[in-house]
Amino acid sequence: MRKLLATTALILAAALAGGASPASAQGEDGKPWVEGELLVRFESGAEKLVQLPPSVGVAMAAEALSANPKVSYALPNYIARASGVPNDPGLGTSAGDWRRTQWNFLPCGSLCGAGSTPLEFEARGGLNAVDAWDILKQRRAGGGKGARVAVLDTGVAYRNKKPGFLKSPDFSPRQFSAGYDFVKGNAEPLDRDGHGTHIAGTIAERNGNGVGLTGLVPQAKIIPVRVLDAQGLGTARDIANGIRFAAKQKADVINMSFEFSLAVSGCAKIKSVCRAIKFATKRGSLLVAAAGNSNGEPVAYPAGAPRVLGVGRTTKDACLAAASRTGAGLDLVAPGGGMPALPSCGVDDPVFSRTAPIFQLTFSGRDFRTFGYPALYEGTSMAAAHVSGVAAMVVASKVLGRNPSPGAIDCQLRATARKSNEQLGQPYDPRLFGSGLVDAAAAISARAPGC
């Protein structure tokens, strides 16, 4: 390996000697990768992180190294960013019960033709966690007990640490398994942003304790894995390591609420990430990822990668949300909140605005000591978290038997998703909705044919 690394240095020196122009050797400011770093895999070994000389540009170095027959690949260390984007602040939270805030967990009820009498609280875009919780209790898997979900994100406010970091008041230490911080390189994956805590809250915020809101599977084990920094940015290398770690920790579900820029158009650009995805799938983990928060096709990576369930977002009225990527790679949609893509889709009602976001308890200030319910979170990040929570329900319910394969869980979620015109706020189109809007109760009621 030392000889190969020496060869790398010689190739870079040769590139410089060949007369690299100042333009090709300048810094990579504004590029979708980490300046001065390459991910290099030699045919005889594992991937290595190579630090480039200051005068060598990433693109030039990648081209020079790729010409070496002993180099399997040389790629930029691409950057992903959290897929939940803030909307305008000002929407306040309700001090009432959770059903007046969490439209995303409500049943569709009479709005979808299930009886003529409207329920007290219902939303066309809700995924029906209410009935799903009853089914889980009947199967002695209340709260998703027995499932393991890895949250790859900005960290989670799951425990105290000096100096300054406090755990969320609506998490219990017993909910968490050992995690890891790949940004700092330690075993304390604590949140520095709030995004990861919000995602973990959708999946597993405690219920029935008289505090805050509720999560989908509060009895599931959460594995916090920090792969994004305090600005919500993370490198391909850290993400690949995080995926492998989660799989080795026996995660049933791995949630990835982030996206690479559209410069990453395939696995050829993030080979280490896609190799890690393949590894995790073989180890029995279902990978769920955010489709991306911009308009157009196809979905962003890693959601667009093989073996990953890519999730778009919908609104309170089961409309496709604005700024949700569509087309190839879109597998499901789930509540993500915000403005409908179609101006005519959805209405305000006495309880919820048609543009309602997703509320969970997370940081509401910058000092990591203040928790609240900021009306800032909407996006495919939030949608992915909902699908991960329902996938955990499928595992816990044993509707597919013990230890279901990732493919079987994927099949079950797709086959039971809602896609009739009566169940959606606009006509169903697979380019916009994938296999449909995830339905928690339907997903765990009975095994779908063919799954």
Image: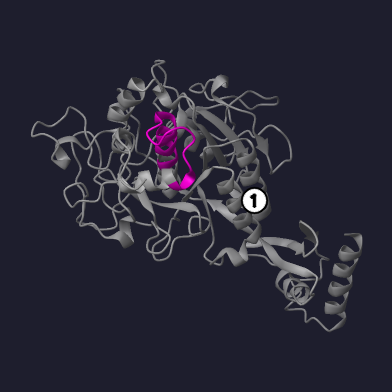
Does 293 sit left or right of 196 as displayed? left
The residue lying at 40 percent from left, 59 percent from top is 325
Question: Looking at the rendering, which quadrant does residue 392 occupy?
Answer: top left
- Residue stretch rendered in magenta on the structure: 387-407
Nearer to the camera, 84 or 77: 77
Residue 409 visible? The answer is yes
Quarter of the image with the C terminus in it: top left
Q: Is 274 a magenta residue?
A: no
Residue 256 visible? The answer is no
Quarter of the image with the N terminus in it: bottom right
The residue lying at 41 percent from left, 64 percent from top is 328
The crowding category of the residue bearing disc 1, from other C-alpha atoms within 10 Å (few below 14, some 14 to 19, many at least 20), is many
Q: Secondary structure at mark 1?
A: helix
Nearer to the camera, 374 or 203: 203
Nearer to the camera, 176 or 61: 176
Q: From this view, report whether residue 65 is shown above or below residue 196.
A: below
Q: From this view, report whether residue 223 is shown above or below residue 437.
A: above
Residue 14: give x, y in percent of width and height.
87, 78
Determine which residue is flagged by label 1: 240
Residue 160: give x, y in percent of width and height.
63, 23
Circle 1: residue type: Ala
- From this viewpoint, which residue is outermost toward the top? 209
- From this viewpoint, which residue is outermost toward the bottom? 19
